[in-house]
């Protein structure tokens, strides 16, 4: 079903065509202050300017607004329209129209959210841990944000292909396998042990001779058959087993089937490079091979290459990504490629996309392909510096999640001492993991954010526990109704009080917000929406008795409760956050 904004958009577009004979975006938005209306159309100012320019006569925006209103047909939808300020058009929606729209949303398993008009095959590239290292907090953001985006896009009907581009074919591989071969007790390797080996060899590569040796080795491995690399396979298996345990714990969708990392394109690199050299796109530059996408220069202002083979003959991060991009476009047939990675990789992705454009890989027979980089900032400690342990080490993800669950457990124990042990453990998991994920998702991903246990686990404010608690509280109304034998009758909504109207209007915005998340790749819009939904629900619940009222108000209010609970649950699902029945 079209949202209220879409309905208004349609009506205003028609009015503008009827009034001025030309199409124009009516610029509908939700009113900041609902004193004058619920929505506003802001097109009159721009239209007046265009008209003044084309006729050479000053046209007043308020006159334009009036002319739009003269042609506007919102019968049955709006109760009131008015012009304000320089030429804003305010619209108030009729309560019975809101009630009708709510009834449609309530009857729809998708809560009235239509699937996207054109469903696309979309690749979401996220997580991407490197071999021989435990995942650390740096991988947390990519994993969580990417997962929320993958969920949201699938909900909108897109065909999402998750791609975990693990870093398993670079210098690290050469170094770690070398360290294993030269260490006596490498039989008993754990991931922690591997990391120690890796650190040791990293220090050794401060010596240029060792560094050359490692590059040479890596070059050989990159040309070898993977089945001849048992140590590499061991390291990879160990790393991925730990990563998948982490994904399960985080309730992230990534599985073994989504892993397609650097080594998965191993047999394509030679051919890729040969083709690019043959076509004249890749050229020699200081002993290396690179492409020169327009617009990229180094500090000296000289063209900057995107290196697909370095001087020492090894394939590099750009090589891996270029092969992966070609595969995603040509073999997977994706029309939208989304990369959720650290803002520090901005230059790399900008060059990658520019190179793909240069090669014509941004078009297929099916249509244009869009490349989108959804970067995120750094997770900071409360001291404002990158989040580290007290001794200055990077924080291991597993340790972080242990602490989250322990802290959540303390909250649950306090709130609900009589809950059975098993359930308490499950709730602590949902709350602890949910708090960590939500703290990350609720900030605009572009900015750095400060990781604070107290804030993220607080029952007040824009946090997962607050939303989970709000959801559980609504569900508890139904348990109480059940105990008293109360059930909603009929199917309609009656909206009288300002709080009911405020809640109704917000419920009907769910689809617009989900679409905005998918368009802008920003889950925090949904977080803000859910937080506001909980606040409006509180306002409603404090002012409008539900079980104590008489029908038809009681049934309508029960339905408002139910739609709120379903919307909260569905929104939390899109974020990958649990919503226990009881907290
Ligand atoms: N392995 C990389 C890292 O740890 C992330 C991979 C990102 N994905 C990509 N297609 N480059 O930083």
Image: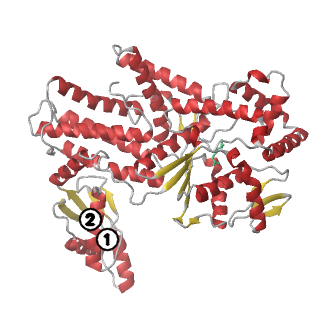
Quadrant assignment, res 204: top right
Q: Residue shown at 45%/44% (left/top)?
A: 151
Q: Is residue 151 above or below residue 97?
A: above
In the orientation shown, which residue stands out farthest toward the right?
A: 209
Q: Is the CB–ligand 1 distance for label 2 below 8 Å?
A: no
In the orientation shown, which residue stands out farthest toward the front?
A: 227
Q: Is the CB–ligand 1 distance for label 1 below 8 Å?
A: no
Q: Is residue 285 left or right of residue 519?
A: right
**Which mark identifies residue 89?**
2
Find residue 517 and report its horizontal and vertical position in percent. Answer: 43, 50
Q: Is residue 224 left or right of residue 124?
A: right
Q: Is residue 324 above or below residue 403?
A: below
Circle 1 sits in a helix, a strand or a loop, which is it? helix
Q: Is residue 282 left or right of residue 500?
A: right
CB under 8 Å between callouts 2 and 1? Answer: yes
Of residues 94 and 293, the one nearer the viewer is 293
Circle 2 sits in a helix, a strand or a loop, which is it? strand
- Which quadrant of the frame does ligand 1 lie within? top right
Q: CA distance from mark 2 to mark 1?
A: 8 Å
Q: Is residue 99 left or right of residue 456?
A: left
Evaluate whether residue 114 shows in this view: yes
Name the residue beneath numbered marker 1: 44
**Is the residue marked by circle 1 packed among few (<14), some (14-19), or many (20+) residues within 10 Å?**
many
Evaluate whether residue 301 shows in this view: no
Find residue 524 and report its horizontal and vertical position in percent. Answer: 44, 45
Find residue 132 and report its horizontal and vertical position in percent. Answer: 71, 33
Of residues 298 and 397, the one nearer the viewer is 397
Report how many numbered discs are placed on residues in the image.
2
Mark 2 or mark 1, which has the lower sequence index?
Answer: 1
Q: Residue shown at 45%/41% (left/top)?
A: 442
Find residue 108 and report its horizontal and vertical position in percent. Answer: 27, 47
Quadrant assignment, res 284: bottom right
């Amino acid at each position: 079903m079209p949202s209220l904004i879409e309905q208004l958009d349609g009506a205003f577009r028609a009015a503008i065509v009827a009034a001025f004979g030309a199409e124009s975006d009516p610029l509908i938005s939700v009113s900041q202050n609902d004193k004058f209306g619920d929505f506003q159309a802001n097109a009159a100012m721009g239209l007046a300017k265009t008209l003044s320019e084309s006729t050479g006569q000053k046209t007043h925006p308020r006159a334009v607004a009036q002319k739009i209103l003269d042609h506007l047909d919102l019968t049955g939808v709006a109760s009131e329209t008015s012009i304000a300020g320089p030429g804003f058009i305010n619209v108030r929606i009729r309560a019975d129209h809101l009630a009708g729209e709510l009834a449609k949303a309530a009857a729809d398993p998708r809560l009235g959210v239509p699937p996207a008009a054109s469903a696309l095959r979309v690749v979401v590239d996220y997580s991407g841990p490197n071999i021989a290292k435990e995942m650390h907090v740096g991988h947390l953001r990519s994993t969580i944000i990417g997962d929320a985006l993958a969920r949201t896009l699938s909900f909108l009907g897109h065909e999402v292909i998750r791609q975990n581009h693990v870093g398993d074919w670079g210098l690290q591989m050469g170094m770690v396998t070398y360290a294993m071969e030269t260490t006596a007790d490498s039989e008993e390797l754990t991931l922690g042990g591997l990391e120690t080996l890796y650190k040791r060899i990293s220090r050794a590569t401060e010596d240029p001779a060792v560094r050359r040796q490692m590059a040479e080795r890596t070059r050989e491995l990159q040309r070898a058959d993977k089945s001849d690399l048992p140590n590499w396979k061991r390291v990879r298996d160990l790393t991925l087993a730990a990563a998948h345990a982490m994904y399960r714990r985080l309730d992230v969708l990534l599985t073994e089937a989504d892993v397609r990392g650097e080594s998965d394109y191993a047999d394509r690199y030679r051919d890729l490079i040969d083709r690019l050299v043959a076509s004249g796109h890749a050229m020699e530059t200081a002993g290396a091979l690179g492409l020169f996408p327009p617009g990229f220069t180094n500090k000296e202002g000289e063209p900057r290459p995107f290196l697909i083979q370095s001087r020492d003959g090894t394939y590099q991060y750009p090589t891996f990504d270029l092969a992966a991009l070609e595969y995603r476009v040509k073999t997977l047939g994706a029309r939208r490629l989304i990369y959720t990675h650290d803002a520090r990789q901005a230059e790399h992705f900008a060059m990658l996309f520019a190179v793909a454009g240069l090669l014509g890989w941004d078009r297929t027979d099916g249509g244009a392909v869009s490349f989108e980089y959804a970067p995120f900032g750094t997770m900071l400690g409360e001291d404002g510096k990158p989040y580290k342990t007290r001794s200055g080490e990077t924080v291991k993800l597993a340790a972080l999640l242990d602490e989250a669950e322990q802290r959540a457990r303390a909250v649950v124990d306090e709130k609900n001492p009589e809950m059975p042990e098993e359930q308490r453990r499950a709730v602590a998991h949902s709350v602890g993991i949910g708090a960590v994920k939500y703290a990350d998702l609720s900030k605009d991903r572009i900015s750095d954010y400060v990781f604070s246990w107290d804030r993220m686990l607080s029952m007040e404010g824009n946090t997962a526990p607050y939303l989970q608690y709000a959801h559980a509280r609504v569900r508890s109304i139904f348990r109480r109704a059940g105990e008293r034998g109360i059930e909603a009758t009929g199917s309609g909504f009656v909206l009288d009080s300002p709080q009911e109207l405020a809640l109704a209007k917000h419920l009907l915005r769910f689809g617009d917000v989900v679409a905005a998340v998918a368009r802008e790749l920003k889950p925090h819009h949904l977080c803000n929406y859910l937080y506001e939904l909980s606040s409006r629900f509180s306002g409603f619940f404090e002012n409008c008795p539900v079980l104590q009222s008489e029908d038809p108000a009681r049934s309508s209010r029960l339905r408002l409760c139910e739609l709120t609970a379903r919307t909260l649950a569905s929104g939390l699902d899109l974020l990958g956050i649990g919503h226990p029945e009881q907290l």
